[in-house]
């Protein structure tokens, strides 16, 4: 089994969405035709952007369109599960476009595995993370009033092919979460590795660790491409 890592730096949300959709559609077409599919994990950062899942409420964006422009952010309604979340510089976003049948895995087990990867990742920095009942993602102090989210997870799947994924707060500017009810919560806050550790962490270091954990949990070989977009979308 192989996972192709598409390693980007910062990429506009709309462009990344299009790349995801093209890769997703290609896998669906190949699967329908009985051809081989490719498991791809896109790793990247976005400029400031808010995204609203199909089950979310626009009212959870607490600012006007004019203020969005003032803070240099954009907004998209998208087709993943979940409510509203934020992406921006210093946050590692991962989009696995996986054929779950190749891993003999259902969607629920897949989301659970993404959470397990992030929980183990946090343990590498001596941060104890876990789940919050009734809420996707990975949290710290999930069992008490100090609960705070370090990683958001929202996915879409069709014919067992996935898109969208996770957003891990590494060196994220947390003030951007003040302008939303993250994932619809009015009484929960967000955190980051930097906030918890008191120091910045290199994004490339995190990418390498996450790639290694994907290889471990999905029992796959990792192949990394720095020129994925050029190779696949000429």
Image (cartoon, rainbow, N blue to C red):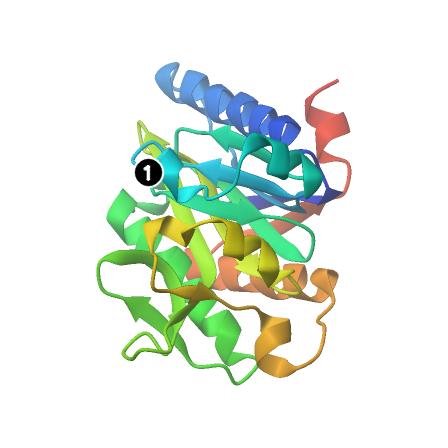
Q: Is residue 111 above or below residue 31?
A: below
Outermost residue to the left: 134
Residue 11, image x, y percentages? 71, 37
Pick the residue in front: 114 or 145: 145
Residue linked to disc 1:
101
Asked if residue 80 lies left or right of residue 221, the reply is: left
What residue lies at 66% left-to-right and 46% top-to-bottom?
A: 44
Pick the residue in front: 160 or 62: 62
Residue 130, image x, y percentages? 35, 72
Dot 1 surroundings within 10 Å: few (below 14), some, or many (20 or more)?
Answer: few
Examine the rendering and report whether any part of residue 62 can be seen: yes
What residue lies at 64% left-to-right and 39% top-to-bottom?
A: 73
Asked if residue 16 lies left or right of residue 107, the reply is: right
Pick the residue in front: 38 or 125: 125
Q: Is residue 93 above or below residue 33?
A: below
What residue lies at 51% left-to-right and 71% top-to-bottom?
A: 121
How many numbered callouts? 1
Examine the rendering and report whether any part of residue 40 can be seen: no
Residue 221, image x, y percentages? 56, 53
Figure quadrant of residue 12: top right
Figure quadrant of residue 7: top right
Tag 1 secondary structure = helix
Pick the residue in front: 45 or 55: 55
Q: Is residue 132 above or below residue 96?
A: below
Outermost residue to the bottom: 126
């Amino acid at each position: 089994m192989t996972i192709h890592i598409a390693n980007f730096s910062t990429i506009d949300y709309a462009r990344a969405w299009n790349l995801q959709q093209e890769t997703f559609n290609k896998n669906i077409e190949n699967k329908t035709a009985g051809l081989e599919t490719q498991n791809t994990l896109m790793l990247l950062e976005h400029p400031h952007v808010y995204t609203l899942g199909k089950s979310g409420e626009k009212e959870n964006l607490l600012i006007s369109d004019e203020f969005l422009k003032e803070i240099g952010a954009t907004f998209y309604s998208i087709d993943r599960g979940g409510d509203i979340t934020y992406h921006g510089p210093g946050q590692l976003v991962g989009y696995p476009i996986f054929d779950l049948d190749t891993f003999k895995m259902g969607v629920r087990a897949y989301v659970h595995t993404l959470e397990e990867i992030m929980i183990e990742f946090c343990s590498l920095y001596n941060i104890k993370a876990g789940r919050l009942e009734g809420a996707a993602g990975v949290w710290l102090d999930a069992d008490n009033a100090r609960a705070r989210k370090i990683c958001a997870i929202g996915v879409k799947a069709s014919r067992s092919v996935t898109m969208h994924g996770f957003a891990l707060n590494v060196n994220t500017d947390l003030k951007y979460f003040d302008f939303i009810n993250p994932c619809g919560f009015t009484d929960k806050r967000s955190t980051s590795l930097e906030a918890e550790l008191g120091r910045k962490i290199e994004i490339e270091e995190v990418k390498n660790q996450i790639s290694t954990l994907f290889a471990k949990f999905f029992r796959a070989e990792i192949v990394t491409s720095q020129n994925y977009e050029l190779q696949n979308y000429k």
